[in-house]
Amino acid sequence: MPKAGSHARQRWPLAVFAIFAITGFLFVAASHSAQGGDLRPAGGDPGSLAQERRERVEERRADARDLRSDIDKLSAKVSGADLKKLRERVDELKEPTGLTAVEGPGVRVTLTDTPNPDAFPDANPNLLVVHQQDIQAFVNALWAGGAEAVTLQGQRLISTTGIKCVGSTVVLDGVPYTPPYVIEAIGDTVDMNASLLTSPGTVTYADYAVSYNLGLEMENVEEIKAEAYAGTVSLRYADATN
């Protein structure tokens, strides 16, 4: 007669075999999914994720520029007096709307958060970082100074471009950016600098820069390149109906 518990002990080899089989299957599945890479790659911090997203968006923008160029070439092959007039009108509007690349002398503005926030323990933390309204103030001042083209972090700005704060980053057309924030504008450097030095928003930021060690650097640049805007130019709006 079998002793008590002998059946349980007999089941142990089968259970151990099943565990090893399942573990081996998981290792094989993980190896196949990783394809020689790391399933948890390094660089998962917010900065790296933002950089990865920026790179993907820039690839899409490059594709959009290529497609727009192809469309222009195909359109040019279509004949017709009415179509020719429309193409001429479109060509006239491309430059003022930011759809053409621009090069020339200009001004570069660099804004950064305070590098030593611990030096201001009693200050409101919001006073120690660059905000959307600060960037917008400098962009508006450059436009007011006659800028022909303006970029932020290398991305072309147009009249419908939205800049907003999300946490500790600034989002431009859905892409997050971290400081330093670099604004470049092409145009008459004398007029643009005069506007930067007198606009209320930029003057206010300059005062806070002195008080809280915020970064503010303005310099003239001999050659600036502003790529053509590659995003959507259609206007979206809300329509309230009764």
Image: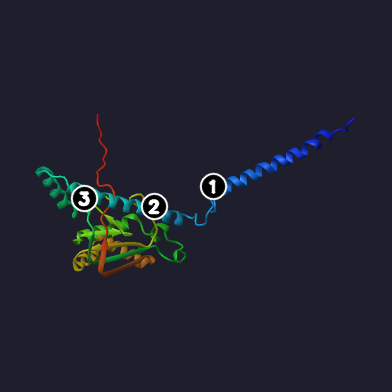
Q: CA distance from mark 2 to mark 3?
A: 26 Å
Q: What label does residue 73 carry, if any? A: 3
Q: What label does residue 137 carry, if any? A: none
Q: CA distance from mark 1 to mark 2?
A: 22 Å
- Foreground of the two, 212 or 85: 85
Does residue 230 show up?
no
Label 2 Cα neighbours within 10 Å, binned few <14 / some 14-19 / many ≥20: few
Q: Which residue is mark 1?
A: 33
Residue type indicated by callout 3: Lys
Q: Residue at x 19, y 68 (%)?
A: 190
Whether pointer 2 and pointer 3 mark residues with C-beta atoms closer than 8 Å, the reply is no
Label 1 Cα neighbours within 10 Å, binned few <14 / some 14-19 / many ≥20: few
Whether pointer 1 and pointer 2 mark residues with C-beta atoms closer than 8 Å, the reply is no
Q: Residue 142 placed where, x, y %?
A: 23, 61
> In the picture, which quadrant includes the C terminus?
top left
Q: Residue 17 placed where, x, y %?
A: 72, 41
The answer to which image quadrant residue 198 occupies is bottom left
